[in-house]
């Protein structure tokens, strides 16, 4: 049984192609995030599901029935907008019951459902307040309650946290996830903030230029990005130019490193080695070249940035132009600027990309 | 499905039809004026056959040669220039002062500048008449109209200058200028005024329009300004009066069209009627 | 437009210029800054407050020197009462026509996408037309709808409809309403456009998403949110129409409305000794305007609360 299915959806705005051939299937009860930079098409995809945009080609169906040509007000989706979507002249309670009134639900039932939904978002006390008396976070929670009150088949969230302060964002994000799992409602969540996407999703769809680059679990997307774009967009990446030496062997900055290479790469081909900062470790001291174990690269510390939970150390490796960022956490000793260190790449976590696949 | 399509089509047509009807309503009177002023055929004889006969500019030429007209025109223009100067001299420093020194007083000042609406021109001039014996030296001069015109224009001018200053973040500019060593005179001359140019132009045009069209006060105080002349002249020379009135309308329109162009928002911002959206009481009353 | 300048709210206390004598004072120099408002206050006092006061005083003081409120009461009798009734009725009708037509025109300006210059044209024209009036406008309508008017002729020649066979007169309620609409409609457009712009797209979409049609939106969100602006517009147009003098003066010799009667009293056209009544009329007029503008101001502040 499928909850929400996009099939070969294509959408252009004039000359720009917003969505190329978009396929996505959401399983019932799962939360899928569409993640990507602005202009990648994620919001367009969401709005096509809501009915605010019409697909040029392809179809959208919910629980088996095709809704591609159904007007927006006849679909049964709940939507939460980025900001300022609460009706200013209606109280919180009246906002939440709006969808119930259009569906001609009787008064007693309406009051019951409004009460329940407000309880769910923990805002029962504010039922008679008006939107302009609420904070940003409270407004979005009311918007969520309003969308859920009609018990929709799918919940659509269009960057609901972007307009909020950082602290509020984190708490509300977790609350959304909690409510979503509690109700078991299929949810499509659009965001440009990868931390959000990784934290709450069952699956993450990374998009770029109208195309879905990778659709997988958060861990998978982070640890095994399927393309250089995904690798760079999700989390941060160090990049080293390298040469293929043989099977699973690369020469980087004068040293030989063991990294799974792509099958079929020719010896001598130029590649890019992508490593996350937390997958590089440094040891102080500078062993002599002949006694350097395999996979270690020598370099000098150029900068230290203390970030609270972690410290980012920039190391300029011998033979490479760009400095490498290294994450140190916890008890690891912080080297001094100018000190000589050895960097060790965790080869299991590194990714190898042919040059030109930017 | 079909019903939705038909409804949407109708929904698209009716605003257009309505706009066209409005356009007709606003253009027809002007056409009628033009025909009356410039076509020498009386209405009774006007028909499809005589539609293009008798068009002449005589209607406009006659008043132009009239010496009374020339005097009235000169007076109105002088009054306009003087009023604009007085308005700027009063309102520009005051508005700047409020923004830089007394931001909390801004709502109060805004309220003050709206007061002129509450006292319509006819009531104001009624209050001026009894004061005549006390200020004869002042009220006898033609220029006694000036301060009252400043007051009539005050809501517009304050709004225009205020909006311009707000859009500018004057505080930061002034602080930057002063931190670089400029004195107040220098700051005002070289930093503030050039940046407020469009607001100042707006305020000036609006004031000029008010002065050139004001009739009530001029009539009661027996000053022979342009509108007063026009009203009287129309009784004597209907065509000439009409031609003058049309010229006045066309000129005012041109003035404001220029103003709109000069103060057009740069870039992609949706055009907003900032400068001209002052609540108005019939300004030419 | 009247958003409180939040950024400078607290900084007024630190803005002492370097060269001023108070640069070294620790206390914020607040009290002396009000001196800067003196020119404006003096100006308004002299040319606005004093004449208004004199109107009020003169309405209390009869020609024989006695003081009393009788004239103020007499202002509501006889022909003056008729003038008040006519003025109120005319202003209400003219305001209503202006609100409906102007509101619809503003809405059309917002919704019509093509051609793209239409919106700017409507705004520019409204800016011009809202300030037109008085003599030229009256003449224009005489040329159009007078007994020898162009439209009158077209209606009789082309459609066989004799305009003046009906009870139509340019100085009747409907005649004046038509003329006043020429500046009332654009004025309403200027006031309403920002309010309509303030109707956020998200509200429309949220309403559709929750199952509401266009009609539902307007009934439950759109019109209620716009209502303060619409009511404010009505009040403003009412005040505008009530106080109009020049346009009416050019259209009629009779003194049908309050402003005209004030003018007649002032020139001694009605009765040489009755100018006290003129001042009474003026006083009442000021009162009515105060109430109107006060309500308008209040409504505008409320409407702005929703235009975050």
Image: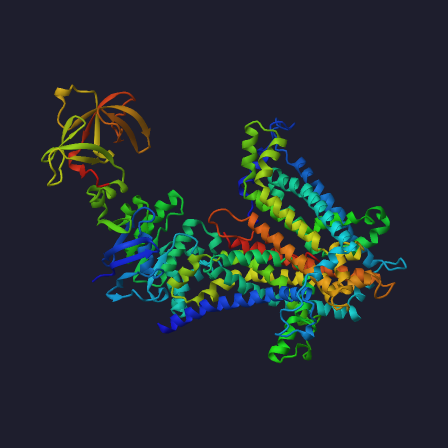
Residue B241 screen position, x and y as percent: 73, 62
Q: Quadrant of residue A4?
A: bottom left
Q: Residue C76 falls in which quadrant of the image?
A: bottom right
Viewer can see residue C243: no
Residue pushed farthest right? C64
Identify which residue is drawn at 68% across, 75% down. B45
Relative to the observer, which residue lies in front, A237 or C57? A237
Q: Which residue is depicted at the point 25% across and 43% down?
A: A229
Name the quadrant of the N terminus of chain A.
Answer: bottom left
User: Is A10 or C21 nearer to us in this picture?
Assistant: A10
Count all numbered tags in the image, as a single digit. 0
Whole-percent x and y of residue A351? Answer: 18, 38
- Name the residue located 58 percent from the left edge and 56 percent from the top edge: C300
Q: Nearer the viewer, residue B264 or A117?
A: B264
Q: Position of C159 compared to C40: left or right?
A: left
| Residue B78 seen by the camera | yes
Q: Is residue C271 above or below residue A280?
A: below
What percent of the width, then of the height, locates residue C75?
79, 65
Q: Is residue A114 left or right of residue A250?
A: right
Outermost residue to the left = A247
Residue B26 percent across, percent down from the top left = 60, 64
Colour scheme of the picture? rainbow
Outermost residue to the top: A288
In the shown orientation, is residue C69 left or right of residue A85? right
Looking at the rendering, which quadrant does residue A25 occupy? Answer: bottom left
Horizontal relation, residue B71 to residue A168: left or right:
right
Name the quarter where the C terminus of chain A is drawn. top left
């Amino acid at each position: 049984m499928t909850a929400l299915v996009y099939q070969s959806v294509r959408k252009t705005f004039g000359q720009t192609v917003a969505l190329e051939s978009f396929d996505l299937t959401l399983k019932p009860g799962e939360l899928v995030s569409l993640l990507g930079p602005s202009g990648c098409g994620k919001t367009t995809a969401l709005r096509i599901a809501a009915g605010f945009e019409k697909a040029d080609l392809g179809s959208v169906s919910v629980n088996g029935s095709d809704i591609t040509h159904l007007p927006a007000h006849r679909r049964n989706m709940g939507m939460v907008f980025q900001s300022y979507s609460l009706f200013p002249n209606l109280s919180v309670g009246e906002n939440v019951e709006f969808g119930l009134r259009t569906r001609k639900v009787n008064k007693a039932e309406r009051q019951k459902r409004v009460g329940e939904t407000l309880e769910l978002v923990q805002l029962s006390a504010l039922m008679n307040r008006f939107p302009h008396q609420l904070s940003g976070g409270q407004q979005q929670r009311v918007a969520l309650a309003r969308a859920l009150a009609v018990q929709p088949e799918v919940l659509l969230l269009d960057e609901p946290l972007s307009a909020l302060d950082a602290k509020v964002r984190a708490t509300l994000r977790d609350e959304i996830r909690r409510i979503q799992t509690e109700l078991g409602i299929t949810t499509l969540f659009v965001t440009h903030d990868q931390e959000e996407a990784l934290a709450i999703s069952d699956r993450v769809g990374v998009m770029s230029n109208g195309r879905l680059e990778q659709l997988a679990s958060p861990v998978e997307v982070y640890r095994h990005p399927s393309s250089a774009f995904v690798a760079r967009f999700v989390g941060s990446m160090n990049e080293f130019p390298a040469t293929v030496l043989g099977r699973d062997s690369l020469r980087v900055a004068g040293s030989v490193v063991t990294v799974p290479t792509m099958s079929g790469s020719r010896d001598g081909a130029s590649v890019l080695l992508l490593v996350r900062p937390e997958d590089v470790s440094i040891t102080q001291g500078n062993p002599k070249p002949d006694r350097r174990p395999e996979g270690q690269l020598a370099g000098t510390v150029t900068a230290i940035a203390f970030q609270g939970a972690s410290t980012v150390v920039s190391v300029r490796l011998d033979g490479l132009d760009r400095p490498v960022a290294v994450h140190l956490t916890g008890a690891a000793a912080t080297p001094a600027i100018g000190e000589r260190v050895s960097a060790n790449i965790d080869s299991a976590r590194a990714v190898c990309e042919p040059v030109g696949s930017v | 499905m079909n019903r939705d399509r038909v409804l949407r089509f109708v929904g698209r047509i009716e605003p257009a039809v309505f706009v066209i009807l409005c356009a007709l309503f606003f253009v027809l009177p002007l056409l009628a004026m033009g025909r009356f002023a410039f076509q020498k055929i009386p209405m009774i004889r006007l028909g499809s056959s005589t539609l293009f006969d008798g068009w002449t500019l005589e209607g406009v030429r006659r008043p132009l040669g009239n010496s009374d007209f020339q005097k009235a025109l000169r007076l109105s223009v002088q009054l306009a220039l003087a009023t604009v100067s007085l308005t700027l001299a009063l309102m520009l420093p005051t508005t700047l002062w409020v923004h830089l020194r007394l931001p909390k007083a801004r709502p109060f000042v805004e309220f003050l500048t709206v007061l002129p609406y509450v006292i319509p021109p006819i009531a104001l001039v009624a209050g001026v008449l009894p004061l005549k014996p006390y200020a004869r030296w002042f009220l006898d001069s033609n220029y006694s109209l000036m301060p009252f015109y400043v007051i009539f224009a005050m809501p517009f001018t304050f709004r225009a200058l205020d909006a311009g200053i707000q859009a500018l973040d004057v505080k930061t500019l002034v602080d930057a200028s002063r931190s670089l060593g400029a004195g107040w005179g220098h700051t005002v001359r070289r930093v503030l005024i050039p940046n407020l140019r469009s607001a100042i132009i707006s305020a000036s045009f609006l004031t000029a329009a008010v002065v050139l069209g004001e009739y009530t006060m001029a009539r009661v105080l027996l000053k022979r300004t342009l509108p007063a002349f026009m009203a009287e002249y129309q009784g004597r020379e209907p065509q000439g009066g009409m031609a003058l009135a049309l010229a006045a309308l066309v000129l005012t329109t041109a003035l404001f069209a220029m103003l709109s162009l000069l103060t057009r928002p740069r870039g992609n911002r949706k055009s907003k009627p900032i400068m001209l959206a002052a609540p108005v009481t019939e300004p030419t009353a | 437009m009247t958003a409180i300048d939040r950024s400078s709210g607290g900084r007024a206390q630190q803005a002492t210029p370097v060269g001023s004598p108070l640069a070294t004072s620790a206390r914020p120099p607040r009290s002396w800054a009000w001196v800067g408002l003196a020119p404006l206050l003096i100006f308004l006092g002299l040319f606005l407050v004093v004449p208004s006061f004199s109107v009020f005083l003169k309405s209390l003081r009869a020609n024989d020197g006695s003081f009393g409120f009788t004239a103020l009461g007499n202002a509501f009798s006889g022909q003056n009462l008729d003038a008040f009734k006519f003025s109120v009725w005319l202003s209400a009708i003219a305001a209503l026509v202006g609100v409906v037509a102007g509101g619809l025109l503003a809405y059309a300006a917002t919704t019509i996408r093509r051609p793209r210059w239409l919106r700017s044209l409507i705004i520019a024209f409204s800016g011009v037309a809202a300030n037109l009036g008085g003599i030229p406008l009256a003449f224009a309508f005489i040329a159009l709808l007078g007994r020898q008017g162009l439209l009158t002729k077209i209606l009789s020649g082309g459609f066989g409809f004799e305009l003046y066979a009906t009870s139509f007169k340019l100085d009747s309620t409907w005649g004046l309403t038509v003329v006043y609409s020429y500046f009332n409609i654009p004025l309403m457009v200027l006031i309403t456009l920002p309010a309509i712009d303030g109707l956020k797209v998200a509200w429309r979409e949220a309403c559709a998403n929750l199952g509401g049609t266009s009609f539902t939106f307007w009934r439950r969100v759109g019109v209620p949110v716009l209502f303060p602006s619409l009511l404010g517009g009505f009040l403003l147009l009412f005040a505008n129409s009530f106080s109009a003098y020049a346009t009416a003066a050019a259209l009629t010799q009779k003194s049908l409305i309050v402003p005209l009667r004030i003018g007649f009293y002032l020139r001694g056209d009605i009765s040489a000794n009755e100018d006290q009544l003129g001042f009474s009329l003026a006083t009442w007029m000021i009162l009515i305007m105060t109430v109107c503008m006060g309500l308008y101001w209040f409504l505008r502040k409320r409407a702005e609360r929703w235009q975050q």
